[in-house]
Each structure stands twice: as C-alpha cells, then as structure tokens.
Image: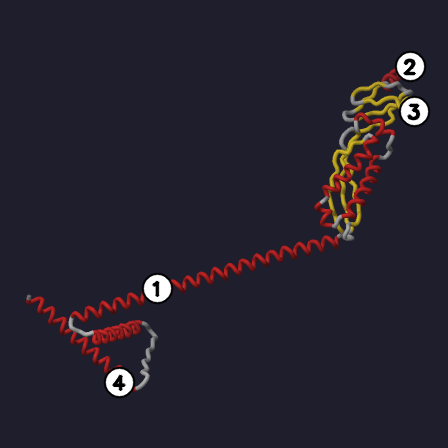
Amino acid sequence: MSFYLIGFLSFFFLISCFFIVKQQTAAIIERFGRYQSIRQSGLQLKIPLIDRIAGRLSLKIQQLDVIVETKTLDDVFVKLKVSVQFKVIKDKVYDAFYKLDYPHDQITSYVFDVVRAEVPKMKLDDVFVKKDDIAIAVKAELNDAMMDYGYDIIKTLVTDIDPDAQVKAAMNRINASEREKIAAQFEGDAQRILIVEKAKAEAESKRLQGQGIADQRREIARGLEESVEVLNKVGINSQEASALIVVTQHYDTLQAIGEETNTNLILLPNSPQAGSDMLNNMVASFTASNQIGEAMKNQNKDKKKE
C-alpha cells in the first residue's frame, strides 16, 4: 500500500515540475514569495512546493474603451469615446507586473485628464474637426506615463463624439435649414433660367414670324407687280389693272369664306357715298375684266390666223 502511495506522490511531484506557457504570454515565477524569473511560451520547468506561478501577462495588443463626458468652449456637454490600444513590452514584463496593479484604471485616469484638458479649449464644431489632435495628445501623454510601467501605447482613437440630445437636434435643424436654403437657391436659378430661355425662344419666334410675314408680303408685292406688268402688255393701264386685282382678291376672299361653315360676313361702308363709290368701282372692275377677256380672245385669234 505504501508503495502505491509513494509512486503516486512521485508521479504528482514529477507532474508538478512542468507547466505550459501559451503563445504571446509571459509567466512570472516566484520562489518563496520572491521574484525568480520570467518564462516565455512553451514547456517550462519549476521546483514544486518551492517555485510558484505568481501570474501571467498577455503580450497581445489589448484595447480599452474609455467614455469621457466634458464641456466644450461654447458650453456644450459632449461624450467622447476614446479607444486605447496598448500592449505589455516583452522586455519589461517585470515592471508591468510588479509596478502597476490596475493598468486599465491607470490608463483611464490619464485619458480623462487629457480629454478634459483639451476639449474645453475647443468649440463643438472644432471637436469634430480636431478629434485626431485629441487622440494624438492622449497618446503622447499615455506614452510618457505608461512606458515606465512596461506598457507601450500603440494607438489612440476618438471613435465617437456624442453631444447632448437637444444639441444634436438643433444641429440637425441647422443642417436641414442650410440644405433647404441651398435647394431654394437652385430652384430659383432653375426658374430664372427657364424664364430667360422662354423669353429668348419667344423673341426668336416673333423674329422668325415677322421675317416670314415680311417675306410673304414681299412675295405678294412681287406677284402684284408682275400681274400689273402682264396686264399692261395687253393694253390695260395700271389703274385698271389695280382695280381688276382688287376685284379678283375680293372674289377669292368670298370663295374662301364660303368654304367654311357657320361663317358670317358683314361689309359696312363708312358712308353712303363710300358705298356708292365702292359699287361704282366694282362695276368698273367688272367692265375692265370683260374688256380684258375680249382683248385676250382677239389676240389669240390673230395668232391662230398668222
């Protein structure tokens, strides 16, 4: 029975001599309560009942998020979330383990101190713009303080800036008002451009319309001139030719009006004398028309005899 007991104790003693340290981890060994050595990753050996593992420190990069509430230069309370990335320096594991019990609390205190010293110097808008400057100031302060304790500050980031809810609502209203103002300006510019372009189009249309009317009248005048010249060649003077053209245009107008339905035409002379003169002119025009017709017939007969 004692043999088994001795064997069991021997096995337990042998097993107690070995221990494993994980990758990116450091183990601190003490002997009778006094620092003995630091063991890195791998299979390690210690003396049972004499040496003990006082603690283990991770050598990985760690992150601590600190939320700080402070006031800006324009008296606006704001919450900043500062993320601190740090790690234990491999050659200073002793300092990190024995000089500082609560590194997270120490880092938090320095973050509070720096942020509450920097942010009150800035207005709220500047806090958003200069958040990188705040992060740099925090990193510089932490590096100077934590290096002596065996900690290296890798990076500090201001990851969130959260003003008071009423302040955010006011900022949103200001932003919305600015955008509405810009939108109104664009709409006004668009309306002005439409009006200008419409005016230009109307002016161009009027110009082209006037040019068309002028061209039309010019062609009418040219046609009348040619008609008078033709009539003059058959022995009709200019006055009779003008009367004949007027009568022709008169009947053309009546014909055009007769082609339309539900059309009424009222001819009102200015005076009885004017009406009588119009009638006499029309009779004279009819007479001249008959004479022209007879003259053209006689001319055609003479050409055939020749």
Q: Residue at x 21, y 81 (%)?
A: 283
Residues under numbered marks 4 and 2 in contact, where contact means CB atoms less than 8 Å apart = no
Cα–Cα span, label 2 and label 1: 128 Å
Identity of the amino acid at label 2? Ile
Q: Looking at the rendered structure, which numbered label has been put on residue 276?
A: 4
Q: Nearer the viewer, mark 2 or mark 3?
A: 3
Query: Regarding mark 2 in the picture, which secondary structure is present there?
Result: helix
Query: Regarding mark 4 in the picture, which secondary structure is present there?
Result: helix
Read off the residue under disc 2.
Answer: 6
Residues under numbered marks 3 and 4 in contact, where contact means CB atoms less than 8 Å apart = no
Q: Quadrant of residue 86?
A: top right
Q: Nearer the viewer, mark 3 or mark 4?
A: 4
Q: Which sits in the foreground, 253 or 175? A: 175
Cα–Cα span, label 4 and label 2: 160 Å
Compare marks 4 and 2 and give the one earlier in the sequence: 2
Read off the residue under disc 1.
Answer: 212
Identity of the amino acid at label 1? Gly
Read off the residue under disc 3.
Answer: 33
Q: Is residue 114 left or right of residue 275?
A: right
